[in-house]
Amino acid sequence: MTATEILIRVLADRAELADLVARHSLWIDEGRYDETDRLFTEDVVVKSPRGEAHGIKELIELVSAHHVYARTLHSKSNLVIEVDGETATVRAHDVAVFVIDDKTEAVAAGILRYGARRTEGGWRFDRLEITSIAVTEALDRAL
């Protein structure tokens, strides 16, 4: 490959991985569980303060059991993407608002560490570790 072709591949990989992170937020916020295989490998391992999941089925069960809010809004930022051939890591900050009901909400912040690998269908996350940084109690809603 030429230097230009290598650069294009690196930039394309980084763009695809950043898109996966953004789609992860939509997956949670909009309950797009039918798109799980577009984000995660079948053998994904997820570790979070709310539990651990091995595989897509357990991941959906874990998320469904704990995201019982009226709405959520996850915002991921400060992506640090490292590509190493057919594997990659992505580190992201995540701030989430959890609308509990018409009168209350909560806010959480954490660090997400994704592992990814290139598959026939493109990049997919094969692991995710969530480290909680801060979580509020229920707060009165202003709007």
Image (cartoon, rainbow, N blue to C red):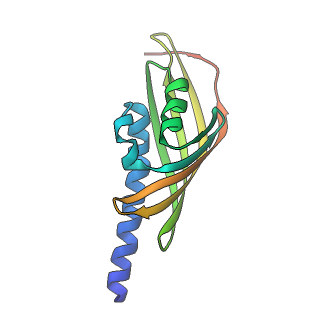
Q: Residue at x 46, y 40 (%)?
A: 75
Q: Position of residue 53 (x, y in %)?
A: 59, 39
Toward the bottom, the furthest residue is 2
* Residue 21 as seen in the image, left or right of residue 130: left
Please state which of residues 109 and 112 is positioned toward the viewer in this rendering: 112
In the image, residue 139 sits, relative to residue 90, either above or below, namely above
Where's residue 13, x and y in %? Answer: 39, 66
Q: Nearer the viewer, residue 135 or 52?
A: 52
Q: Spot the residue most to the top.
A: 103
> Which of these two is toward me, 53 or 19?
53
Q: Residue at x 47, y 12 (%)?
A: 101
**Is 58 above or below relative to 93?**
above
What residue is drawn where x is 47% and y is 62%? 117
Q: Quadrant of residue 34?
A: top left
Q: Quadrant of the C terminus?
A: top left
Residue at 37%, 53% in the rendered image: 19
Image quadrant where one finds the N terminus: bottom left
In percent of width and height, residue 78 lies at 52, 54
Task: State the count of labels.
Answer: 0
Task: From the top left corner, tell me how far across and down residue 138 is, in percent.
Answer: 60, 17
